[in-house]
Every structure is written in structure tokens, then in C-alpha cells.
Amino acid sequence: VVELVGGSDDGVTGTLYIIGTNWPTPGVVIYVSVHGLALGPHGFHVLMEGNLGNKCKDAKGHFNPDGNDHNAPTSLDRHAGDLGNIFTPRYGPTNIYIVDRYISLGDDGPRDIAGRGIVIHAGEDDLGQGGDAESKKTGNAGARVACGVINIVH
């Protein structure tokens, strides 16, 4: 369970539920319900640390145990933390359902996201296709508007 706190935008609130799964293959299911995001796409990433200080910047960079460039979540060569974009509609909360088979939860494996940070950015993630060095590092998604720590709940 992840309770979001404001980063650069204190009006963003919400809860993420992340469920580890082993069927049909290992991975995670992420359900997101967020209020207060601006209309449009927002970069969505798992970060290295579960420290939310300094307006989410203390969570450090994208979780990248494999040393890959930033990319789309469908790429085999990506940061483990690359979850792409979530989209906020004109009315109502941002509700998203994601299945990701690249990361895991609570298994102490190399791509285990338990205890790490998760962030929602102000802008759209260019998925590493922006044509500059920052694109291959962060996706040029802008400020961190909300973040939280991925906590295991039994």
C-alpha cells in the first residue's frame, strides 16, 4: 500500500495498491486512485529510496538495478522503475490498473520494489525517445508532484 504525499503540488492525494503475483508469471498488479492531478499524462516511476524528504527528491533516481537506459515499460531494456504514464481525465480521479512482469514485490529479488519510493510527475514521460541525455535518464517528465513509500502490508 502506498499513501501519496505532495511533492511540488500539495493538492495531490491518493492511494496505490500493489499486489505481488506469481500467476501466470511473476510480477505485480498496481491499482492507482489519485485526486488533484492536472488533466493529461503524468510520468509514473519506482525510485531507488523510500525517503520522501525534500519534496520527494530524497527518493533519488529511478530504480535501475540492471543499469539500462530509461525506456517504455514494454521494453526489455528499461529501468525496473519505468512504469510509463498514467492519464488524468477531465473529470473525476485518476484511476489506473497496471500489470508489470518486470518487477516484483516482497521476494528480495533483484527487481523487488518493497520499501522503495514511487512518484508521479507533473508532465508526460517521453519514454526515452526525447533525443537528449535527460530523456535516457528520466524521460523529461518534470517535477515530482506526489510520492509515497511502497509498504508491505500483511
Image (spheres, rainbow, N blue to C red):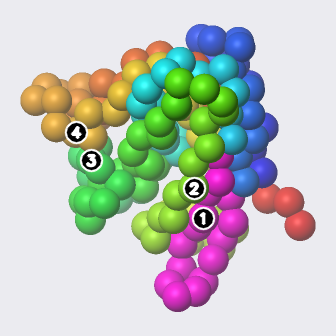
**What residue sits right under mark 1 in the picture?**
29
Q: Quadrant of residue 77?
A: bottom left
CA distance separating discs 4 and 1: 23 Å
- The percent coordinates of residue 15 (x first, y second) are 75, 41
Q: Which of the two residues, 154 or 13, is positioned nearer the viewer here?
A: 13
Q: Quadrant of residue 117?
A: top right
Which residue lies at the image location 70% right of the left edge and 46% below the top edge?
16
- The percent coordinates of residue 80 (x first, y second) are 42, 55
The label number, if any, that marks residue 57 in the structure image: none
Q: Is residue 6 left or right of residue 47?
A: right
**What residue sits right under mark 3 in the picture?**
71
Q: Earlier in the sequence, mark 4 or mark 1?
A: 1
**What residue sits right under mark 2 in the picture?**
97
Q: How many marks?
A: 4
Q: Is residue 31 left or right of residue 143?
A: right
Q: Which of the two residues, 142 or 95, is positioned nearer the viewer here?
A: 95
In terms of secondary structure, where does tag 3 sit?
A: loop
Dot 2 and dot 1 residues touching (CB under 8 Å): yes
- Residue type at mark 2 is Tyr
Q: Earlier in the sequence, mark 2 or mark 3?
A: 3
CA distance separating discs 3 and 4: 5 Å
Foreground: disc 3 or disc 1: 1
Q: Is residue 105 magenta?
A: no
CA distance separating discs 2 and 4: 22 Å
- Residue type at mark 4 is Gly
**How crowded is the residue under tag 2: few (<14 C-alpha within 10 Å), some, or many (20+)?**
few
**What residue sits right under mark 4 in the picture?**
128
In terms of secondary structure, where does tag 2 sit?
A: strand
Q: Write the start and end of the magenta stretch as one range.
A: 18-32
Foreground: disc 4 or disc 1: 1
